Image (tube, rainbow, N blue to C red):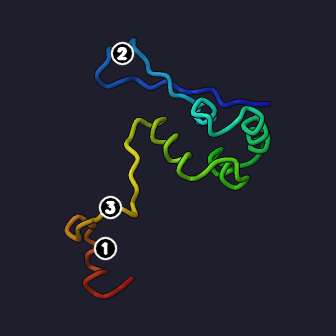
Amino acid sequence: MSRVVPFTIASPEAPPTTRLRRMLLGDLLVRKGVLDADRLAAALDQQTGQDQKLGRILLANGCIASEDLTAALSRQSGLPQVDLTECWIHISSATPRLTANASMGVR
């Protein structure tokens, strides 16, 4: 079984010698209890030789729910989780192209 080696990134606030370790997606899901180690190992084996992200494989195999994936990706990246079905975007925030298309009735 092959595993991807995590990379390290420098924290902008930390001195150059301090590094943050990025947690692996599979490890996050196992720690959270939404995925067992056997299913993770099977998905990692399936990923070998394929050009697919682990999260997509886990979703396609029914191993995890999309909510579990987005929560784990949010934690992994350090970015907040946002449910776009519950967000309103004001038209003035749209890009000029989107605004122009909306005013012309183009979808």
- Mark 2 burial class by Cα count in 10 Å: few <14, some 14-19, many 20+: few
User: Which of the two discs, 3 and 2, labels the residue nearer the N terminus?
Assistant: 2
Horizontal side, residue 87 vs residue 54: left or right: left
* Secondary structure type for disc 3: loop
Location of residue 5 in the rendering, given as x and y in whole percent from the top left corner: 63, 26
Residue drawn at (73%, 52%) of the image: 61
Residue 2 vs 62, above or below: the answer is above
- Quadrant in the picture for residue 86: bottom left
- Residue position marked by numbered label 1 in the rendering: 98
Foreground of the two, 4 or 84: 84
Amino acid marked by disc 3: Cys
Q: How far apart are the two marked residues, 2 and 1, measured between alpha carbons?
A: 41 Å
* Secondary structure type for disc 1: helix
Amino acid marked by disc 1: Leu
Residue 74 vs 83, above or below: the answer is above
Residue drawn at (45%, 37%) of the image: 77
Location of residue 53 in the rendering, given as x and y in whole percent from the top left corner: 64, 47
Task: Single out the mark in the foreground, 3 or 2.
Answer: 3
Residue 87 vs 3, above or below: the answer is below
Amino acid marked by disc 2: Pro
- Residue position marked by numbered label 2 in the rendering: 16
Residue drawn at (31%, 73%) of the image: 98
Quadrant in which the C terminus is drawn? bottom left
- Mark 3 burial class by Cα count in 10 Å: few <14, some 14-19, many 20+: few
Task: Single out the mark in the foreground, 1 or 3.
Answer: 3
Horizontal side, residue 9 vs residue 68: left or right: left
Residue 2 vs 18, above or below: the answer is below
Residue drawn at (74%, 48%) of the image: 50
Location of residue 44 in the rendering, given as x and y in whole percent from the top left corner: 74, 38
- Residue position marked by numbered label 3 in the rendering: 87
